Image (cartoon, rainbow, N blue to C red):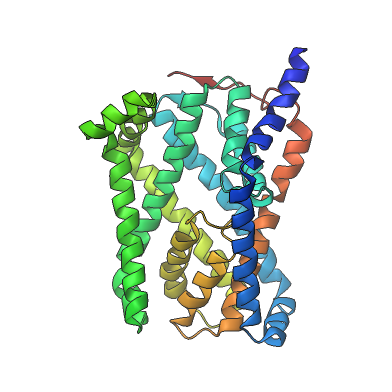
């Protein structure tokens, strides 16, 4: 087989691998559809349709632009994280790769589809698989830490808005689970039983991830800008939700959006549905309901946010079509680890 044929077949094999566990994907699709259908069925569908159709187009466009700009900011954070673990690549190629990844996160029935595409494009540019995967995993970890920081800062107000004890417990348990998960990932290599298990299973290299994650999060010169960008991104997402809510006439303060939307994002990170659909809508209905937003309006805001996110990612499809068959991203990349 020619080298060109090999290069072309690689993304196809990667996509096939992502779609291979069909039973798991079918369950995720079924959960997404079931949750969305249940939410729509349990609301006033006329009011929901009215809210969706009467959204101010200028607000909707502004939300799309904001979400599109956040992809560039996320790329900046990714570059910082990658450099901290010894992987160097220029911003523009990284942004192109990231935009492609955002597109595939929206269209593939797998929550890691975009990440797999990002790894493949980095590999095509000369970055080895291990460092490429590590840069993406740690970038996601930094994003999660940023979410936790915002929620923890706003926890006093969040719990004050919630008057149902079960919901308070649920929010607190989710935050605690996220904190424990991050802690375990950061220090997994320090546990002797984990090291022995990793050696026996041939996964010893995986324990390099905690070491590299600490290089990012335990060094102020790296952690400060990376976490600042994470907080900026999450607040930007909250701003886009606030803009969409304003576009359908929902009264939502900036503080409510800033603290409640990250909670919604935290819940939608649970990988049980397709691109968070269903879980995000349910969490949005509950979260915004705590500050008096009606069920139909909250669901409309969440659906509009999902649509705006998909539109903001669409340029990645065009970039993929223009460059997807080439082995290079348009500029040289290099791995130093």
Is 267 positioned to the left or the right of 91 in the image? left
Looking at the rendering, in which quadrant would you find the C terminus?
Answer: top left
Percent x, y for residue 167?
A: 37, 76
- For the question of whether residue 254 can be seen, the reply is yes
Give the answer, above or below, for where 299 lies relative to 44: above
Most extreme residue toward the top, as rendered? Answer: 2
Give the answer, above or below, for where 282 lies relative to 202: below
Nearer to the camera, 63 or 37:
37
Splitting the image into 4 quarters, where does residue 3 fall? top right
Nearer to the camera, 88 or 134:
134
Splitting the image into 4 quarters, where does residue 336 fall? top left
Percent x, y for residue 107?
A: 69, 50
* Residue in view at x 47 percent, y 58 percent: 234
* Residue in view at x 56 percent, y 52 percent: 70
Q: How many marks?
A: 0
Is 235 positioned to the left or the right of 294 in the image? left
* Residue in view at x 59 percent, y 36 percent: 116
Splitting the image into 4 quarters, where does residue 204 fall? top left
* Residue in view at x 31 percent, y 67 percent: 172
Percent x, y for residue 63?
A: 63, 63
Give the answer, above or below, for where 116 lies relative to 251: above
Looking at the rendering, in which quadrant would you find the N terminus?
Answer: top right
Nearer to the camera, 143 or 110:
110
Nearer to the camera, 239 or 277:
277
Percent x, y for residue 305?
A: 61, 65
Give the answer, above or below, for where 15 lies relative to 251: above
Is 220 positioned to the left or the right of 115 in the image? left
């Amino acid at each position: 087989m020619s080298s060109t044929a090999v290069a072309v077949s690689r993304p196809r094999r990667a996509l096939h691998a992502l779609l291979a566990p069909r039973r798991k994907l079918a369950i995720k699709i079924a959960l997404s559809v079931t949750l969305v259908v249940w939410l729509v069925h349990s609301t006033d569908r006329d009011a929901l349709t009215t809210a969706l159709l009467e959204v101010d187009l200028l607000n909707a466009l502004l939300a799309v632009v904001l979400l599109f700009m956040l992809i560039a900011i996320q790329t900046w954070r990714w570059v910082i994280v990658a450099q901290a673990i010894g992987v160097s690549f220029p911003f523009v190629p990284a942004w192109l790769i990231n935009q492609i990844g955002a597109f595939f996160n929206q269209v593939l029935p797998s929550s890691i589809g975009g990440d797999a595409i990002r790894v493949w494009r980095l590999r095509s540019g000369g970055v080895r698989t291990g460092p490429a995967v590590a840069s993406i995993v740690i970038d996601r970890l930094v994003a999660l830490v940023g979410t936790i920081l915002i929620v923890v800062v706003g926890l006093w107000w969040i719990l004050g808005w919630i008057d149902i004890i079960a919901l308070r417990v649920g929010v607190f348990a989710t935050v605690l689970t996220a904190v424990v998960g991050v802690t375990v990932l950061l220090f997994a290599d320090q546990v002797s039983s984990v090291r022995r298990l990793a050696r026996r299973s041939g996964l010893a290299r995986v324990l390099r991830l905690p070491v590299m994650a600490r290089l990012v999060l335990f060094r102020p010169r790296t952690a400060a800008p990376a976490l600042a960008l994470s907080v900026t991104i999450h607040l930007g997402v909250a701003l886009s939700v606030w803009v969409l809510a304003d576009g359908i006439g929902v009264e939502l303060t900036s503080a409510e959006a800033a603290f409640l939307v990250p909670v919604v994002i935290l819940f939608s990170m649970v990988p049980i549905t397709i691109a968070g659909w269903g879980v995000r809508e349910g969490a949005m209905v509950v979260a915004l309901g705590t500050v008096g937003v009606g069920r139909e309006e909250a669901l409309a805001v969440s659906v509009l946010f999902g649509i705006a996110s998909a539109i903001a990612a669409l340029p990645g499809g065009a970039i993929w079509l223009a460059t997807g068959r080439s082995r290079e991203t348009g500029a040289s990349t290099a791995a130093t680890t």
